[in-house]
Image (spheres, rainbow, N blue to C red):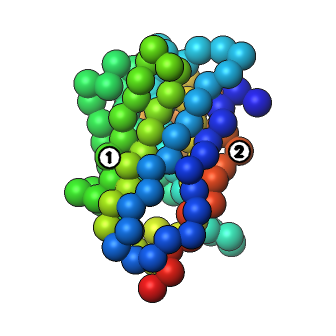
Amino acid sequence: VQLQASGGGLVQAGDSLRLSCVASRRTFRNNAMGWFRQVAGKEREFAAAINWNGGDTVYADSVKGRFTISRNNARDAVYLQMNSLKPEDTAVYFCAAAIDSYITDSARRYKYWGQGTLVTVSS
């Protein structure tokens, strides 16, 4: 396993969660990183991304203003702070490392994927 995501769980609408993704066996300090999410039976969708040094971020419209992506390259980790959670945020969340340092919302430009962590938001 090269990317290990954690922090998912069952919360109520309006609550917060912080997802973490830690790299092992190799470093992704020079790669852009992203978070995607997937609901069973639907395609994986982009949530947030951050460039290699944390200086640039991009968000899906559905999470903008509620989610914050950050990274700590000294720890080879990326985080997703999720506030004001809604039932429609329920999904399996995946972290991923892009093929290079440039920020992107395209899943095709992500090469390494974590195993996913389940977030369930009850109404």
- The answer to whether any part of residue 104 appears in the image is yes
Q: Quadrant of residue 43?
A: bottom right
Q: Nearer the viewer, residue 75 or 51?
A: 75
Of the residues shown, which amino acid type is indicated by label 1? Thr
Q: Are marks 2 and 1 in contact (CB under 8 Å)?
A: no
Q: Residue at x 38, y 56 (%)?
A: 82
Name the N-terminal-most of marks 2 and 1: 1
Locate the N terminus by quadrant. Answer: top right
Q: CA distance from mark 2 to mark 1?
A: 21 Å
User: Residue 45, percent across and down?
Assistant: 51, 57
Residue at x-position 33% and y-position 53%: 67
What is the secondary structure assignment of the residue under circle 2?
loop
Report the number of numbered marks: 2
Near mark 2 (Cα within 10 A), the count class, few <14, some 14-19 or many ≥20, is: some
Q: Amino acid at mark 2?
A: Gln
Examine the rendering and report whether any part of residue 48 can be seen. no
The spot of residue 11 in percent (x, y) is 49, 71
What residue is pinned by disc 2? 115
Residue at image coords 56%, 50% = 7
Q: Secondary structure at mark 1?
A: strand
Which residue lies under the disc numbered 1?
68
Considering only vertical position in the picture, is 105 above or below 13?
A: above
Q: Residue at x 30, y 36 (%)?
A: 57
Residue nearest the viewer, comparing 102 with 52: 52
Q: Is residue 9 left or right of residue 67?
A: right
Q: Is residue 13 above or below residue 78?
A: below
